[in-house]
Amino acid sequence: MARMHSRKKGKSGSTRPARREKPVWVELSSEEVVNEVVKLARKGVSQSLIGVVLRDSYGIPLVKVVTGKSINQILKEHDIEA
């Protein structure tokens, strides 16, 4: 939506994490993250929603940083269509 007293659009939205290393607060191993991604995908959750769930529920900023693979690559390895 536009701002109330100007003709500009807002700039809100999440930004990608600046660091490309595993954060200190992430306690899950890469195998546990992969299992969680596969479990959510088998329930029919989309890739973007999987990332949101992992971010909000488990504190994982980027799956690729923790596992070394993107969500799409993980799903292809487990023969899951997304």
Image (spheres, grey):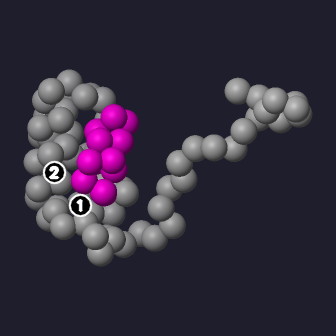
Bounds of the magenta span? 48-60
Q: Residues within 10 Å of mark 1 (few under 14, many from 20)?
A: some
Q: Which mark is residue 67?
A: 1
Q: Is 54 one of the magenta-colored residues?
A: yes
Residue type at tag 1: Thr
Q: Residue 72 at x, y = what percent? A: 29, 41
Q: Residue at x 37, y 57 (%)?
A: 61
In the rendered image, residue 39 lying in the magenta stretch gets the answer no
- Residue 77 in the image: x percent, y percent? 16, 44
> Mark 2: which amino acid?
Val
**Spatial distance from mark 1 to mark 2, Cα to Cα?**
7 Å
* Disc marking residue 32: none
Image quadrant holding the C terminus, namely top left
Whether residues under marks 1 and 2 lie with C-beta atoms below 8 angstroms apart, the answer is yes
- Disc 2 marks which residue? 34
Classified by dominant secondary structure, the portion drawn in magenta counts as helix
